[in-house]
Image (tube, coloured by chain):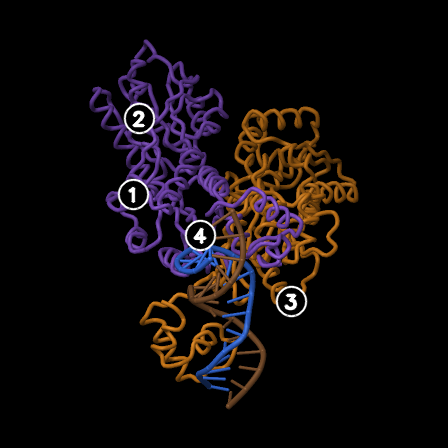
Chain colours: A orange, B purple, C blue, D brown
Amino acid sequence: MRISDVARHAGVSPSTVSYVLSGKRSISAATRERVLESIAVLGYQPHAGARALASNRSNVIALVIPLRPGIHVPVAMQFAVSVVTSARDREHDVLLLTQAEGEGGLRRVAGTSMVDGIIVMDVEVDDARIPALRALSHPSVLIGVPADTSGLTCIDLDFEAAGRACVAHLAALGHREVALIGQPPSVYERRTGFAERTVAGFEAEARERGVESAVVPCDAGQAAVTATVTELLRERPRLTGIVVHNEPVLPTLLEAVRGLGREVPADLSVVAIAPDDLATEVSPPLTSVSLPAEEVGGRAVSLLMDKLDAIDPPEVTLLPPRLVPRASAAARPALF
Amino acid sequence: MRISDVARHAGVSPSTVSYVLSGKRSISAATRERVLESIAVLGYQPHAGARALASNRSNVIALVIPLRPGIHVPVAMQFAVSVVTSARDREHDVLLLTQAEGEGGLRRVAGTSMVDGIIVMDVEVDDARIPALRALSHPSVLIGVPADTSGLTCIDLDFEAAGRACVAHLAALGHREVALIGQPPSVYERRTGFAERTVAGFEAEARERGVESAVVPCDAGQAAVTATVTELLRERPRLTGIVVHNEPVLPTLLEAVRGLGREVPADLSVVAIAPDDLATEVSPPLTSVSLPAEEVGGRAVSLLMDKLDAIDPPEVTLLPPRLVPRASAAARPALF
DNA sequence: TTGAAAGCGCTAACAG
DNA sequence: CTGTTAGCGCTTTCAA
């Protein structure tokens, strides 16, 4: 079943069928009807490889998913799924690459023309893959922001503004001493962009507002969380506000705080940076800056498509944070 | 940069270069050396589309990942990653399909020759995609086992045997009344194979051994888990053994049991069916039947490659469960 | 508005 | 052991 079969059946030339399919030139309504009818009747499906060979476009994009220690898999999957969904909306498929393949993988899929472009998640401040990406003739989009963005296209939540927004919210509620419970240490060690930027925003805003602040990384797992919180509250008796930038520990953290005899938000206010579903799933529902994974994934695809259409987008797109007040942050308790 | 450039550089014909690359006919060591040298010097990478067109093989397989309510994303990702890794080991790439695309997606990627074969995860007992899969001329492998496996290739852990092994282990420790804390209700409602099979094995073994048994589905989330456990222990005061087939509730469940004043394993023995990392991550480390996601993913790829090589594998491959005793299951307390 | 025909870059049958 | 060559099925220029 080839394009020439369809052409014969519709009584037109193969090129006409091709043009009906691609819309790259105008076709009379009558002809188009006839061709589409034949396609439907015959169940014609064009051969992807032949298409790729002739048009120099595979209609596939590569997505590099993170598999590192410390990443929260469900959140990573939200990004991945929104990339796949958005790509499909634009007639593209998604080839899955793991980080294990490294830069070689990028060169391979681009070099063999398997894909038209690449989306990379979980970008580090000084990411080893960036030189390879820059050297590629294929367009790419980073989810995350490295130190040097020149010549790149990056999209992410504005984590610095998010960190600031959390402190600002707590400060407005009267809190004078706050802490950031951050990502696992390994995430900072490899200098993941979003984690650093949150810390930077958190600290800057606290400094500017004259609020006492501390930053503590935190591993997942109940023992680690309990230890971190216990230590934090012991060392900082006047602490009344916590910002949490660590999805998996959210439930455990609330548990641990309660275990120490503190009520949220009566004794301790908590603000999270997390996807909405995670923030609302716990009790009490958390005041949070939402992590719009779906929008970021969708925008990443849009940016890549723009580049494929030779539109060149800004180097860095940062989505403004939206802080949604819920039940976990309140005015500073009078006792303090 | 094409194959003819390499051929010219090496002083051979294009077909010789092709054969060096594919190994499909013997080449003198000298020629091979020369060709490989030229490939390296020129940095030649064959065009995937051209290859697919000429050889009728894309060297890509499709993987359909589950995105349904109740699935535990990290475990699903373990499968996905092992599929990608194994596929890469065999010179194949992986195209990611979401369940949202449904059967149409399967027909599309197969019909356009984008992929050579398909792996489907999270198979239901009476899965809507199976007719489409059967109708396809492309080979496929299911991770999971539907009701009618004729003409299909399925791979999974033997969940029925796993359910049996858990009961057998508890019975051997003297327990006389046990319960299965299962997957969320939605998973049973859509009749997911692995969940049903575990229940069947659990109940059959209990019946055969004259052990009292109960099965309770359980949603994730602390409230649901606590409610489930509280109710279970209240209604069954003589219950001394629990089998848990629900990854995300593991930590919360142990917490809840403790909250009710019961010690694990002194008062209550717990056996899990879960990946090893999840079973060992909690306290106490859980006696468990391991869910070998990596092996299942790898085997799925092997089976698919066999089919691509016209070797036809058995319809159903069930990996035997391995129960590893750890600290969470002990002899039935004397009081009961 | 449509058709004819020349490739796209590779593989594999055929020939030697 | 190696070369020649005819496609694979589509897109897109060129021509009408």
Q: Quadrant of the N terminus of chain B?
A: bottom right
| Image side of residue B223 versus residue A328, left or right | left
- The amino acid pointed to by label 3 is Ala
What residue is drawn where x is 32% and y is 55%? Answer: B136
The answer to whether residue B152 of the structure is visible from this angle is yes
Q: Position of residue A324 (x, y in %)?
A: 59, 50
Which residue corresponds to mark 4?
Answer: B97
| Image side of residue B301 versus residue B31, left or right | left
Q: Position of residue D16 (x, y in %)?
A: 51, 90
Which residue corresponds to mark 2?
Answer: B179
Specify which label sits upstream in the sequence, 2 or 1: 2
Foreground disc of the pair 2, 1:
1
- Structural distance between the alpha carbons of marks 4 and 1: 22 Å
Which residue corresponds to mark 1?
Answer: B191
Specify which label sits upstream in the sequence, 4 or 2: 4
Chain ID at mark 3: A
- Name the mark on residue A310: 3
- Structural distance between the alpha carbons of marks 1 and 3: 48 Å
- Structural distance between the alpha carbons of marks 4 and 3: 27 Å
Circle 4: element type = strand
Circle 1: element type = loop
Circle 3: element type = loop
Residue A4: image quadrant is bottom left
| Image side of residue B161 versus residue A265, left or right | left
Specify which label sits upstream in the sequence, 4 or 1: 4
- Mark 2 crowd level (few <14, some 14–19, many ≥20, 10 Å Cα): many
The answer to whether residue A173 of the structure is visible from this angle is no
- Structural distance between the alpha carbons of marks 4 and 2: 37 Å
Foreground disc of the pair 4, 2:
4
- The amino acid pointed to by label 1 is Arg
- The amino acid pointed to by label 2 is Ala
- The amino acid pointed to by label 4 is Leu
